[in-house]
Image (cartoon, rainbow, N blue to C red):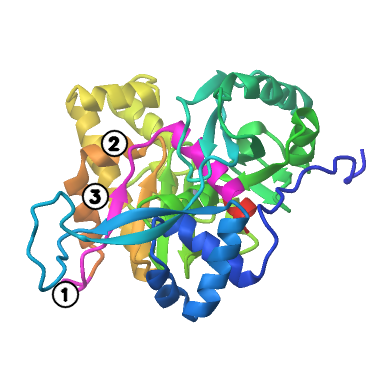
Amino acid sequence: MSADQYHNANVPLWFSGSDNMHRVARTIAQRGPISRIQLTHMLGLSQGALSRITADLLHEGVIEEVNTFTPGILDEGKENDGSEHRGRPQTGLQLRTDQVSFIGINIHSKEIIMEHINVLCQPYAPSYSEPLESFEPHALTKQIARMIPQCTAPHTPPLVAIGISVGGHHTHDRYVQYAPFLRWNSSVDLGGMVSDATGLPCAIFNDIDSLLLKEGWFGSATGLHSYAVLTIGAGVGYSLAVDGKAVNYPDKSFGLVGHIPLDFTGPRCSIGHVGCSSILTSDSIAAEYSAEVGHAVSYEQFERDARAFVPAAVRLAARTAHRLGTLIAIVANIAMPQKIIISGEGSGIAAMNIEEVRTGITQYRHSQAQAVDFEILQFTWSDWAQAAGARAIARYIG
Ligand SMILES: [Zn+2]
């Protein structure tokens, strides 16, 4: 089949306008409700230029005005009249959430999970998931198309785009070149196929980069200049944002942090390293635990044992958290981000052992260096589905 058989794959722009108009809309998406004054300071625009741009965005139905109050600032020289609003009323600008909606989808080794979200990445309803029926691209496409009506909430603004995240390497936000969990090793036009099957524009994104963007636009890294996302689970994932944007590097989706030396007392990985970062993966942890207890145990059983305070599991969970701390310290020392965000199926074990994570970090930091700012997110696959939707939203806003 020709590469251009499908022609609906690119996410369209919400509006056409100058670079500054898109920059203002992006900032309102990330920081809204936000006042015009704050926008002029943040973006270095004149008040006149900004007011022309916001008038255009209001006219296009992209943004709306809302009243906000700056808490605690009383009008000087005025008696407090005891009214509820103790702050100075201000007009804030925010995106209109009644115009368009999106579907975010994450595909991993076991299931397809999707969420119907508004333009601020807020879900309309709980996520919808099904076990992955087939790794074959056409069957997978059919399953996705069948699931979308199940996931779409009634009485919501029209769907304008689908974002799908898959671990692996993708090109042009459309072609999957390599997806180990799907056993795909050559180019698949997944964006084109899904868009053809659903009649909606569909873009394909890397899962870790999607999480990175979601945290920067709608999550705990909003407004930060530089931050990183580290994930542990089936693999070890990493992505870095500088100047609020993902750092591009052609080989970054090939799991470049999967074999970083972490613990010379750790087990050997599949390619012969001793104690490399693959010891943070679920398979390696399950193997290490199995060796310790003397019979085959799954990762899920290890996690249950750790939560039930089985001593061998508690010790391995603490060791794992310490090793993750070492990896966090390496990222902090070399990439120097303002914040490191941790996610993935394995992150729950780290959250249970936060002091061990801190010890692992401290061991590789100068005693006078400031504490590394890190956050372990409460992991859910629906969060990863929303992240794919966030990428589609970012493309739509431009
Ligand atoms: Zn290795």
The percent position of residue 38, horizontal first and vertical second, equals: 38, 70
What are the residue bounds of the magenta stretch? 366-393
Q: CA distance from mark 1 to mark 2?
A: 28 Å
- Which labelled disc corresponds to residue 131? none
222 displayed left or right of 309: right
Gap in angstroms between the C-alphas marked 2 and 3: 10 Å
Q: Is residue 381 magenta?
A: yes
Of the residues shown, which amino acid type is indicated by label 1? Gln
Q: Which residue is mark 1?
A: 368
Position of the C terminus by quadrant = bottom right
Element marked by disc 3? helix
Residue 338 can be seen in this image:
yes
Front residue of this view, candidates 123 and 46: 46
Residue corresponding to mark 2: 349
Residue ID at (22%, 26%): 307
Instruction: Kindly state the secondary structure of the residue where label 1 is placed.
Output: loop
Which class describes the residues within 10 Å of circle 3: few (<14), some (14-19), or many (20+)? many
In the drawing, does residue 152 fall left or right of residue 331? Answer: right
- Residue 93 place in picture, x, y as percent: 44, 58
Q: Residues within 10 Å of mark 1 (few under 14, many from 20)?
A: few
